[in-house]
Image: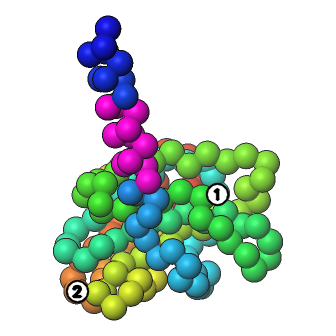
Amino acid sequence: MMSSMLWALTIVMTVFLNTQAEASQGPGSTRMNARLGVVVEGPFDMTCTFLGRSKKVVIVYRRLSKEIWEPKLSCNDGAGSQIDRHVPVDGRDPGLMITGWYDDGQGWKQCNLKGWRNDPKGKSLSCQTPGGGTMTVTCTKGRCAKP
């Protein structure tokens, strides 16, 4: 009985700490440039793929007003080189935007995501960091990519 409770506590703490660690990574209060992001439609499933050494994160923002966007969810290379996410949409999400970020050692910079490409698993966006790393976001299910 006691070992079951310890096991359950260990699992809960692991999930809680991993969620906190993931949420703390990324640009924080760095101002997002909407011109470097890509407006998308939800709901959708996406796969984030990261290559290279610099810290990288993909953030999906939701529109609060004409000029204000807030982070909705993210995936980052601290959680692995390939991460799957489901992006739900509710009535409060009139618009979504995908952005890519990397840390060049002197702070977080926003990546310029390139136009949609056909990928064997769906439509994808990608960008390359100055240090040669890459991040790719593939929409695997849903209407993420506007044709």
The image quarter containing residue 75 is bottom left
Q: Residue at x 71, y 63 (%)?
A: 95
**Residue 142, label in figure:** none
Q: In what element is the residue under mark 2?
A: loop
Relative to 85, 55 lies left or right: left
Closer to the eye: label 1 or 2: 2
Relative to 3, 89 lies left or right: right
Q: Which residues are magenta?
A: 10-20
Residue type at numbered disc 2: Gly
Q: Residue at x 36, y 78 (%)?
A: 102
Say which of 135 and 26 sits in front: 26
Say which of 58 and 43 sits in front: 58
| Extreme-top residue of the structure | 1
Relative to 46, 34 lies left or right: right
**Residue 41, label in figure:** 1
> Is residue 19 shown in magenta?
yes
Q: Residue at x 73, y 46 (%)?
A: 90
Q: Residue 118: horizontal and vertical position, in percent?
A: 39, 61
Of the 4 image quadrants, the one containing the C terminus is: bottom right
Q: Is residue 52 visible?
A: yes
Query: Mark 2 or mark 1, which is nearer the start of the sequence?
Result: 1
**Residue 131, label in figure:** 2
The secondary structure that dominates the magenta segment is: helix
